[in-house]
């Protein structure tokens, strides 16, 4: 007899159940929204003699022969016959149970692509099932779902069909909200999971069918509602009202800057200052192309907070970028009497404690660093403004942690996020609808245009000759490689990609450029080593810097006028543009060389063509969204989960506009329906949009 306190023994989960959980298919609604990739037509039987080569067809007949052929590669050969002809079924991988189910005399229904083999018509590894003469045909097209190796289609189909019957798919939206041409949600889902044989596959595959449009509309509406809720919640929060004092640090910095601000910089500074003066937390994105001068705008925003008696924190994703900010802001602000603290993972011991004490006491008015700035031990006396550079590289939890540094005072700091990847309008309307966006759409005078050239890897020696000429006249050169080193392949694993690594390239260029300094920089070096190499390159004692993408952002060496990007086809378009922006920072004419290894994919060709044709970061961003989708722009904002599963920002602009127009009306007039709609579609993912 079991003890009274004993817990019931839970039944172990099967492999398919575990696979469902891994795919995130936990609730009935999750399964109902797990839509097919494509469909198979199993509603009709094609006589064997009428099947065309290269066509996927379903045939039915009796097994007349079945045996294992041991000549050469072991395989199961099954001959199937109907009244019109015969067909060979070939199985290279099979189990004894499968062989038994295809015994002579058994009636089989098979589906696969017909091809002409050595012995006539055949199918290789068709799907099959044993039937009798009375086995009915399906009344709808058979869905093929995204799945995994341990989750068979048959199991997943049954799970989805069952969930569709149980899922709460009632209409949550009040009458008049859903566009009249779109069907009810339950009807749309039933159609998409089990379309009738006469359904036009074209409209299902390109997702233009009204059933697809209904799902996209609901998803976009939920996303817009979530953004609007987040925006309104933030408006109810309190933040310190920050105003620059007359004759204070802000005006002093403006007076001593060694350059004049552009009109665009002045405009965005005014927009930011207006936000900081309000007692609600600013939530603004500052976007601008590579080299547009975002750093000085950030510095001026920081001085507004400091003038008002508050602290500022600036967080960057890499130590190299954080150090560039630190050096630049220190050179501007230290002469004005400000204390700037430096806090990264490499700052340890007494030096670290000194920085922590300076932040906690308020002695350090500005704290600059990496994610170390948001660690639990870091305390601020009065944090009024948080600035996040390259914001898409930080996760949701990291951004929220920085905002919560004022929680003890029941105030939120103002938040300024910066990005050198301009955001196309459709993406801004979708994922950043709760943000105010400031755009620096003007480059400072004196920035030279960068000429971009594309060469196949066969021109590598010619490029090295060009480098020899450049360094001989005193110029400096970047050479960027995609990998640090080739990983050793485990037993049974495919061989590593044949990519020239940064260490080999460094050795090659050192030999080719005897007499000139060639530096090496990659992510596995210690922080002190990286800093030393960058200092040498910045000082001009190194002529060439061979590096990985650790130099993608924040590196500013005006004398560098040539950038070579090796295996350029392996990089994303925005990343190529960021790397290219490391040159063209001085008065010398600058060139970016993209070396590629063929054959190029269509995407690779499109990227390289775009790079050669335009230097405009906004056009690059638009093309990148077109080529790669929104993931590249969203980065860690998604926290690993796609916020839009069905809607396509390129195709569904009209639906997005309708959802954007309806969201405030629904939230004002039917707040409960709006809340339930967001929970159905986004669940916990709605939190991602608040960071």
Image (cartoon, rainbow, N blue to C red):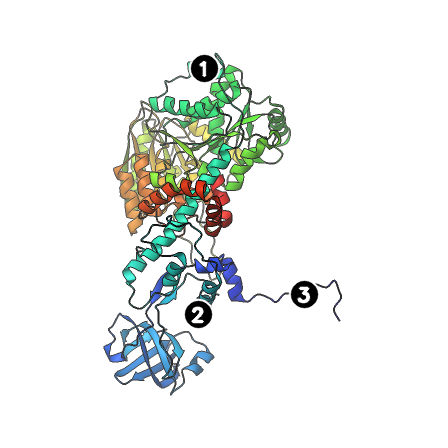
The residue that label 2 is drawn on is 154
Check the image and report above or below for 588 versus 197. above
Residue 685 as seen in the image, left or right of residue 448: right
Image coordinates of residue 164 in percent, x first then y, are 45, 63
Which one is in front in this view, the residue at disc 3 or the one at disc 2? Answer: 3
Q: Is residue 339 above or below residue 424?
A: above
Q: CA distance from mark 2 to mark 1?
A: 70 Å
Specify whether residue 328 is in view.
Answer: no
Viewed as shown, does residue 680 lie left or right of 202? right
Q: Nearer the viewer, mark 1 or mark 3?
A: 3
First reached walking from the N terminus: tag 3 or tag 2: 3
Residue depicted at x 36% and y 81%? 78
The label on residue 635 is none
Q: CA–CA distance between discs 3 and 2?
A: 31 Å
Q: Secondary structure at mark 3?
A: loop
Q: Is residue 603 above or below residue 88?
A: above
**How busy is the neighbourhood of tag 1: few (under 14 within 10 Å), some, or many (20 plus)?**
some
The earlier-in-sequence mark between 1 and 3 is 3
Label 1: element kind: helix
- Looking at the figure, which quarter contains the N terminus? bottom right
- The count of marks equals 3
Residue 251 is labelled as 1
Residue 517 horizontal/vertical position (percent): 41, 32
Q: Nearer the viewer, residue 153 or 430?
A: 430
Q: Is residue 20 left or right of residue 382?
A: left
Q: Earlier in the sequence, mark 2 or mark 1?
A: 2
- Quarter of image, res 341: top right
Which of the two residues, 180 or 234, is positioned nearer the viewer here?
180
Query: Which residue is at 29% across, 58% downward?
Result: 203
Mark 3, residue position? 8
**Drawn side of residue 195 relative to residue 284, left or right:** left
């Amino acid at each position: 007899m079991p003890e009274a306190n004993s817990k019931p023994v839970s039944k172990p989960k099967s492999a398919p159940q575990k696979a469902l959980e891994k795919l995130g298919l936990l609730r009935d609604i999750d399964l109902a929204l797990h839509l097919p990739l494509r469909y198979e037509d199993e509603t009709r039987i094609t006589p064997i003699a009428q099947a065309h080569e290269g066509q996927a067809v379903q045939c039915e007949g009796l097994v007349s022969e079945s045996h294992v052929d041991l000549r050469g590669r072991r395989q199961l050969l099954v001959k199937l016959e109907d009244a019109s002809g015969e067909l060979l079924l070939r199985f290279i991988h099979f189990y004894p149970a499968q062989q038994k189910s295809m015994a002579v005399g058994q009636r089989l229904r098979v589906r696969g692509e017909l091809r002409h083999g050595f012995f006539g018509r055949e199918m290789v590894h068709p799907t099959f099932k044993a039937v009798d003469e009375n086995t009915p045909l399906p009344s709808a097209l058979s869905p093929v779902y995204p799945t995994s190796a341990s989750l068979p289609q048959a199991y997943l189909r049954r799970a989805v069909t069952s969930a569709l019957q149980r899922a709460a798919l009632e209409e949550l939206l009040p009458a008049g909200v859903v566009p009249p041409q779109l069907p009810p949600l339950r009807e749309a889902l039933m159609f998409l999971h089990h379309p009738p044989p006469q359904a036009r596959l074209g409209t299902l595959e390109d997702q233009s069918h009204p059933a697809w449009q209904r799902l996209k509309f609901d998803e976009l509406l939920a996303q817009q509602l979530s953004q609007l809720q987040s925006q309104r919640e933030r408006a109810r929060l309190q933040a310190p009202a920050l105003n620059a004092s007359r004759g204070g640090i802000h005006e002093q910095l403006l007076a001593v800057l060694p350059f004049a601000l552009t009109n665009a910089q002045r405009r965005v500074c005014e927009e930011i200052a207006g936000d900081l003066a309000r007692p609600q937390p600013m939530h603004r994105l500052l976007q601008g192309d590579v080299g547009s001068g975002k750093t000085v705008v950030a510095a001026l925003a920081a001085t507004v907070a400091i003038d008002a008696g508050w602290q500022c924190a600036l967080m960057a994703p890499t130590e190299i970028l954080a150090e560039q900010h630190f050096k630049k802001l220190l050179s501007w602000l230290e002469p004005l009497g400000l204390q700037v603290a430096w806090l990264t993972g490499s700052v340890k011991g007494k030096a670290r404690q000194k920085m922590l004490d300076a932040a906690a006491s308020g002695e350090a008015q500005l704290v600059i660093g990496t994610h170390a700035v948001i660690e639990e031990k870091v305390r601020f006396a009065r944090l009024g403004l948080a600035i996040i550079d390259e914001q898409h590289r930080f996760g949701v939890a990291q951004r929220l942690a920085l905002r919560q540094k004022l929680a003890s005072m029941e105030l939120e700091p103002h938040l300024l996020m910066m990005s050198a990847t301009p955001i196309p309008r459709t993406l801004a309307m979708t994922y950043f609808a709760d943000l105010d966006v400031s755009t620096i759409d003007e480059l400072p005078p004196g920035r030279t245009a960068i000429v971009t050239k594309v060469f196949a890897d066969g021109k590598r020696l010619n490029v090295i000759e060009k480098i020899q000429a450049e360094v001989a006249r005193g110029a400096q050169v970047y050479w960027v490689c995609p990998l640090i080193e080739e990983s050793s392949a485990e037993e049974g694993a495919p061989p590593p990609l044949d990519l020239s690594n940064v260490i080999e390239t460094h050795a090659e260029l050192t030999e080719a450029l005897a007499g000139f300094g060639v530096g090496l920089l990659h992510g596995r070096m210690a922080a002190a080593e990286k800093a030393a190499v960058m200092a040498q390159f910045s000082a001009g004692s190194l002529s060439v810097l061979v590096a990985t993408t650790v130099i993608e952002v924040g590196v500013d060496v005006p004398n560098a006028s040539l950038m070579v990007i090796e295996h350029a086809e392996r990089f994303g378009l925005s990343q190529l543009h960021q790397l290219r922006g490391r040159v063209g920072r001085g008065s010398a004419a600058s060139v970016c060389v993209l070396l590629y290894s063929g054959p190029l994919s269509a995407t690779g060709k499109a990227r390289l063509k775009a790079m050669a044709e335009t230097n405009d970061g906004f056009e690059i961003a638009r093309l990148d969204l077109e080529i790669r989708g929104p993931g590249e722009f969203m980065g860690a904002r998604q926290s690993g989960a796609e916020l839009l599963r069905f809607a396509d920002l390129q195709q569904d602009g009209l639906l997005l506009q309708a959802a954007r127009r309806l969201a405030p009306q629904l939230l004002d007039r039917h707040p409960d329906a709006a809340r339930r709609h967001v929970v159905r579609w986004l669940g916990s993912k709605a939190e991602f949009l608040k960071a």
